[in-house]
């Protein structure tokens, strides 16, 4: 063996001896709160908030819920509604339109253009103009009807 190997082995032995010295025979030097021995803890409160006792519910195993809204709000009637529903409905529900807050005309125009350019919606230019006109006529802050 060469000298470097002896130095490496010596360092490993010293490091092993130091790690055992820092813990008295492998036991932790400071006892954790509530620790009796490794894996065994006192049954008392260890300085934490105790959980409240379980509440008994006398309602029984059957629960009832009120009616759920199971409809999609329809698009507003008007010129361009069918074109909007047809082309926008290819990729998403018309609910995406009706659930938006009233948006300015420029925002609707950029949204329609984003659907075509970014997401690849197959909407011809003439139909896109009809959709934008429909959205501007019914879903801007000035025209939105509740």
Image (tube, helix red, strand yellow):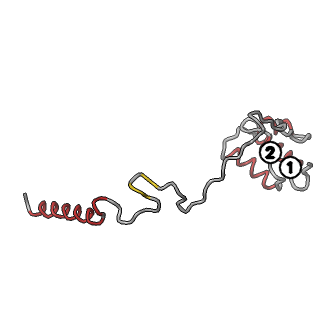
Q: Are marks 2 and 1 in contact (CB under 8 Å)?
A: yes
Residue identifier under label 2 = 97
Camera-side residue of 47 and 6: 47
Within 10 Å of disc 1 (Cα), the crowding (few <14, some 14-19, many 20+) is: many
Residue identifier under label 1 = 139
Camera-side residue of 51 and 109: 51
Seen at 70% across and 44% down, the residue is 116
Q: Secondary structure at mark 1?
A: loop
Q: Secondary structure at mark 2?
A: helix
Within 10 Å of disc 2 (Cα), the crowding (few <14, some 14-19, many 20+) is: some
**Is residue 83 at all visible to an observer of this figure?**
no
Camera-side residue of 51 and 146: 51
Residue 90 image position (x, y, % from top left): 73, 35
The CA distance from mark 2 to mark 1 is 8 Å
- The reply, left or right, for residue 47 in relation to residue 1 is right
> Residue at the left extreme?
1
Residue 40 position (above or below residue 74): below
**Is residue 56 at all visible to an observer of this figure?**
yes
Res. 8 image quadrant: bottom left
Going from N to C along the chain, the mark reached first, 2 or 1, is 2
Residue 33 position (above or below residue 124): below
Quadrant occupied by the N terminus: bottom left
Seen at 48% across and 56% down, the residue is 42
């Amino acid at each position: 063996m060469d000298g470097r190997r002896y130095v490496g082995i010596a360092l490993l032995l010293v490091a092993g001896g130091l790690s055992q010295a820092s813990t008295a025979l492998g036991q932790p030097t400071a006892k954790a709160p509530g620790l009796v021995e490794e894996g065994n803890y006192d049954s008392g409160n260890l300085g934490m908030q105790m959980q409240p006792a379980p509440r008994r519910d006398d309602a029984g195993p059957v629960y009832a819920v009120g009616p759920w809204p199971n409809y999609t709000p329809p698009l507003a009637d008007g010129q361009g509604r069918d074109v909007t529903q047809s082309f926008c409905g290819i990729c998403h529900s018309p609910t995406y339109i009706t659930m938006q807050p009233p948006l300015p005309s420029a925002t609707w125009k950029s949204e329609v253009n984003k659907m075509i350019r970014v997401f690849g919606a197959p909407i011809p230019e003439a139909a896109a103009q009809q959709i934008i006109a429909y959205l501007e006529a019914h879903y801007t802050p000035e025209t939105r009807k509740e």
